[in-house]
Amino acid sequence: MSPLPVVLHNARIVDGTGAPPVPDGVLVIEGPTIRWCGPAGEAPDDPDLRRATRVDLGGRTVCPGFIDAHVHFALPGPVESPLAGAGEPVSYRTLKVLERLRVTLHNGVTTARDLMGLDAGFRRAVAERRVAGPRLLVAVSMLSQTAGHADFRLPSGIDALASAVAFPGSPPGIVDTVDDLRTRVRELVAAGADCVKLAASGGVTSPHDQPEWLGLRPEMIRAAVEEAEAYGGLPVAVHAIGEPGIAAAVRAGVRSIEHGYALTDELRAEMAERGQFLVPTLLETMHDPDPSTVPAAVRAKAVHWHRVAQESVARSVQAGIRIAMGTDAGLIASHGQNLKELGLLVRIGGMTPLQAVRAATSDAADLCGVGDTTGSLTAGKAADLVVCGTDPLDDIDSLADPAHVHAVLKEGRVAIDRAGVLTAAGLPDLIP
């Protein structure tokens, strides 16, 4: 690492806490962490900083590294069928995942929560800087009952999730009794899961169910929450689209509702009171499936529920529910386009740009349990930051274009520097 601190100055600071931007800001990086961040007029004056490398950012805006709380790196997005992995060696599937991790990091996401697909080995490889990617949190598997959203067994006998998405050794996703569910949560703990992912409703893409169906019985959801709490307080994230699944999950005390399209005002009030999070995944709803690639029934589900999602989210924001950014990237949305979600939270969700940035930084960090490590430009936290070529509070959609993501740092190391703004800093590369 650089022997002396690096001082980034002449920067507009959006620190991720929801505080107003600092127009003439200074950010001090020391090794992998932030030493100080604030207005230039209040910057500390000590011998180290007087001798530090100083980099003029030319008025660019600096934000915390963004967090996507709902991704699927094992899925390909729109570039190919999600079943393509069924015909590929595991080694080949792994190499494709590595490219998705890289492009996601380079486009501004420094932390991501994979809610089904990746195992703990990917998390370890990223943490050890063997591969480039966001800091990873993994659920490993998604759990539902037979004929629920985790049941992708096809008439041919192929289990599509097991053969095309899951990696060898991952616990299976289908559970049909309370005791089985308790055991499966423990197996996920043993497999290194950072959170537990349940499917409390049917899904759009799953073959045997409907989103308005209850995909896990309430007593099973309660058992999962109890087991997760007993094993270190793991958060429970729940896929829930229709009202029965949402209600069962909210009242079982889960940490987050993923999607939440059919939320009622009563359930919104309960979520706000409990401090539960909603991860709206609007990006996934912006493109209906190609009718040439999916069955007509799947397309019909998507068209209907995508409209419901877009009509629902603003009421959830107005109800005071805590929102965390998530995209469902890999399902329909492309990897690396994660920051498009920010503009959708503003245009469709009615958030201000500052609120949207907070949803993708400090609030998402709190949801994922990494708020002590990242999520804001705060002294002592990891030096995860994005140097923007535009002012995202003036043009939030600009971050959807990677050309405006001028540089990305992760733990004080340069992941990408498109504009060459950090060349003089002497910071090490993320991957030497």
Image (cartoon, rainbow, N blue to C red):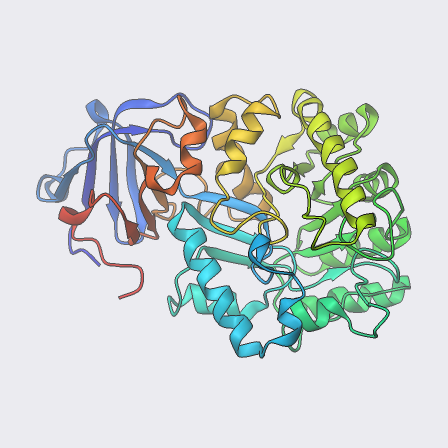
Taking the image as shown, residue 132 lies to the left or right of residue 349, namely: left
Taking the image as shown, residue 200 lies to the left or right of residue 26, namely: right
Where residue 81 appears, as percent x and y from the top left, is 64, 61
Q: In which image quadrant can residue 288 be found?
A: top right
Quarter holding the C terminus is bottom left
Where residue 3 appears, as percent x and y from the top left, is 15, 56
Viewer-proximal residue among 114 and 208: 208
Viewer-proximal residue among 224 and 238: 238
Viewer-proximal residue among 6 and 318: 318
Where residue 179 appears, as percent x and y from the top left, is 88, 66
Image label count: 0
Viewer-proximal residue among 80 and 196: 80
Image vertical order of residue 259 relative to residue 14, above or below: below
Q: In which image quadrant can residue 308 be found?
A: top right
Image vertical order of residue 314 relative to residue 180, above or below: above
Q: Residue at x 51, y 30 (%)?
A: 343
Q: Is residue 146 visible?
A: yes
Q: Residue at x 21, y 53 (%)?
A: 427
Q: Residue at x 31, y 23 (%)?
A: 22
Image vertical order of residue 420 relative to residue 179, above or below: above
Q: Is residue 200 visible?
A: no
Where residue 285 appears, as percent x and y from the top left, is 66, 39
Q: Residue at x 43, y 64 (%)?
A: 127
Quarter holding the N terminus is bottom left
Q: In which image quadrant can residue 228 be found?
A: bottom right
